[in-house]
Amino acid sequence: MDAASMPINMAVSVNLADHGINAQAFRYGNLTMESDKWIAVKDTGADGAPQVVTVDMHNGNTVNRRPMKAEACLMNPIDNIMALKGSTEGTPGNFVQVFNLDSKEKLGVYQSPANIAFWRWIAPRILALVTDVDIFHWNLAVANSQPEKIFQRAGKLAEAGTQIISYSANSSISWCLLTGISTQDQGKTIDGNMQLYSVEKKQQQLLEGHAGCFGNVVVADGAAPA
């Protein structure tokens, strides 16, 4: 079967090592890719100073290096907006700062009293923060806003030994899905657990699984996707 007739073709879009990014930076939580537009990496420069590296894959894989002490970086999937996460010595939890790099504007600052275990953009201006206990949505389209608690982790997903690997929401953000993994036998098997939550009904269902997502479908001719 030739490549043209295959249902899926894979090709290398960018080799980060060729752009001078350390191979030690290629690890979970240190490198993020929220869409096919940006790659963000927490790296160190030649002098050992911490820096955040972004790769614009829609602009010839342009690399931009900024000296920053952030622990993690998350680029907006659509716009040139960067979220930075870090911690302050003597202060519990994490802080998050969000900047519009085009307008040089700071969109928001938040000090979480709890550790932020996972974060993700779930809409162009909504940043989801998963702490050790709760899940928050931060609407950055509203000036001076603060994250709003949506629901609390439950079941296996509330246990300390569970690693959160994914969080998603449908297009209307009325349903949310939290996913985590854990092991009961020192890594011989990996258990997957999910927490499906209805924002409108404030009800949840605990499921088993390692991955899930939402999508929009047209259920009637002429109807909008739902």
Image (tube, helix red, strand yellow):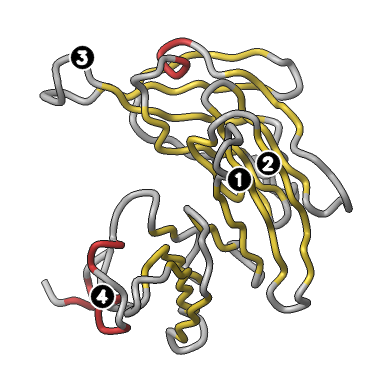
The residue indicated by pointer 2 is 226
Relative horizontal placement of residue 9, taking residue 167 as reference (left or right)? left
- Residue 218 visible: no
The residue indicated by pointer 3 is 184
Q: Residues within 10 Å of mark 4 (few under 14, many from 20)?
A: few
Q: Position of residue 157 (x, y in %)?
A: 44, 19
Q: Secondary structure at mark 1?
A: loop
Quadrant of the snapshot with the C terminus: top right
Nearest to N terminus: mark 4 or mark 1: 4
User: Are dots 4 and 2 in contact, CB under 8 Å?
Assistant: no
Residue 11, numbered circle: 4
Mark 2 vs mark 1, CA separation in Å: 5 Å
Residue type, mark 3 in image: Gln
The residue indicated by pointer 1 is 216
Q: Residues within 10 Å of mark 2 (few under 14, many from 20)?
A: few
Nearest to N terminus: mark 3 or mark 2: 3
| Residue found 54% across the figure and 18% down from its top | 153
- Name the residue at the bottom extreme: 60
Mark 3 vs mark 2, CA separation in Å: 39 Å
Q: Secondary structure at mark 4?
A: loop
- In the image shown, does 166 or 185 lie closer to the viewer? 185
Vertical placement of 37 versus 70: above or below? below
Front of the two marks 3 and 4: 3
Residue type, mark 1 in image: Asn
Residue type, mark 4 in image: Ala
Q: Position of residue 44 (x, y in %)?
A: 36, 69
